[in-house]
Image: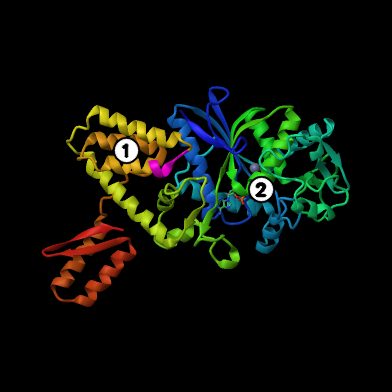
Amino acid sequence: MLKFYNSLTRKKEEFAPLQDTVKMYSCGPTVYSYPHIGNMRAYLFMDNIRRTLKYNGYKIDGVMNITDVGHLTSDADEGEDKMLVASQKENKSPYEIAKYYTDIFMRDVKELNIDLPEHIVPATSVIEDIISFVQGLLDKGYAYITSKGVYFDISKFGGYGQLGNDINSKKAGARIEVDGEKRHPADFALWIKAPKEHIMQWASPWGMGYPGWHIECSTIGKKYLGEYIDIHTGGVDHKTIHHENEIAQSDCLEGHKVVRFWMHLEFLQIDGGKMSKSLHNVFTIEDLKNNGFTAEDFRFFYFNAHYSKQQNFTYDSLLSAHNSLKNFKNAVKEHKNGSFSLPKEREEGYRQEFLNAINDDLNMPIALAVCQKLLKEPKSKDVYNLIVKFNEILGLKLDEDDAIPEEIKSLAEKRWQAKQNKNYAEADRLRGELLSQGYTINDKKDGYDIVKN
Ligand code: AMP
Ligand code: ZN
């Protein structure tokens, strides 16, 4: 039985789609700066869900938005337009900024072997649909117009706060000063009127302007998945404002509950604390690579913690993931031509344990432990085949050709000769060169091994 924790009911619940195909929506990236490894944890989480659904035999119709229209620096519609800031700083048009960072995002998620949604939709491609959505809310009396734009009237929606946003809390009250025209401090913008100089703006029945942030997700979900969505994913930071507002917009327009399962990922911490520019600890996949790691090491690192718990990143913990991954792959290879025949009932036991782990709200640490236990069996092609099956979830490159390239072999041979001739300086130089190309030489009594790092 497949179970997911649903933030809406605060319980682990049995999951089955409403229809044959699972309709799944994932909040995507904002593309005005480099995506960091915390963001990547969110997409590994999405990948984890998608692969688990497929493993259980489901087809998926998945969507992810790309926020390529500027939105304001805080969820509560205050602050600066981040796209505008990036655009001024880098002296590029917002479209150039969005394209540049979208390309980097796509490169990173591909390197992480993330199973991508069927539709990846930039917000700027659905402006007309957003306008119709907002008009729909106005027509039904859930929105009102001010001099600043169109606002959602949360007092009209009895279901506000389902994910835990307490709108009567002090924090919300403090925002009362922010905009006297708003009927309630937690009312949020659906459409924002743009001053002339604003760089991204579109014509609408309410004048030139641009959409609020939350509306793009509701609109893209409706356009691509319809009025019933099985699963919606995102990071915990989005839970109590962004997702609360999405629920308000979508449920009010459709007149019923749109999303059944809300799933949230806890944050990646760095060195036990928050990632922040001022602490210079906002790492990207590129940074990890520059430190000698691969995107796959980070993928393997993700499996070490449950998604609903914070995960702490340090380079030491990444190194241990890197080493475990190396051992894991080597162990898998050793089984490839093994002759032991794994008894059928034992094989079935592993299959069941693995399935139980992933189906228990994506318990990847346990799933990985099952793999490790399996790999300790005597060398067996059956073990190899089973790991290949489990790899539908893990998504590792197991059959990568790890043959040592000819030029590396020849450099190693030159080094060996230099050493034999007691030309130690040259031997050391060649060892360094090999190391910089990712290979270590381990000398033995009568020769050497070349090991890929
Ligand atoms: P953004 O581009 O800021 O909208 O973030 C994209 C996704 O990354 C969202 O689902 C966020 O919740 C998620 N996210 C941001 N920071 C972190 C973090 N440190 N750890 C995990 N997820 C994060
Ligand atoms: Zn969203």
Q: Is residue 112 left or right of residue 7?
A: left
Q: Which residues are magenta?
A: 362-366
Q: Residues within 10 Å of mark 1 (few under 14, many from 20)?
A: many
Separation of residues labelled 1 and 2 (CA atoms): 40 Å
- Asked if the residue at label 2 sits under 8 Å from ligand 1, the reply is no
* Residue at (45% x, 33% y) in the render: 359
The picture places residue 193, in percent across and down from the top left corner, at 83, 48
Vertical position of residue 435 compared to residue 3: above or below = below
Q: Residue 429 in the image: state x and y as whole percent.
A: 27, 72
User: What kind of residue is marked 1?
Assistant: Ile
Q: Is residue 114 magenta?
A: no
Whether residue 395 appears in this view of the structure is: no
Front-most of residues 378 and 403: 378
- The 10 Å Cα crowd at callout 2, few under 14, some 14 to 19, many 20 or more, is many
Residue, disc 1:
387
Q: Tell us which disc is closer to us: 1 or 2.
A: 1
Q: Is residue 85 above or below residue 386?
A: below
Q: How far across and how far down the image is residue 176, in percent? A: 83, 52
- Rendering quarter of residue 382: top left
Local secondary structure at mark 1: helix
Instruction: Tell me the residue that label 2 is attached to.
Output: 68
Q: Main secondary structure of the magenta part?
A: helix
Q: Earlier in the sequence, mark 1 or mark 2?
A: 2
Residue 81 vertical placement versus 15 (above, below): below
Mark 2 residue type: Asp
User: Residue 150 occupies which quadrant of the picture?
Assistant: top right
User: Which quarter holds ligand 2?
Assistant: top right
Q: Is residue 308 left or right of residue 327?
A: right
Q: In the image as oriented, which residue stretches furthest toward the top?
A: 19
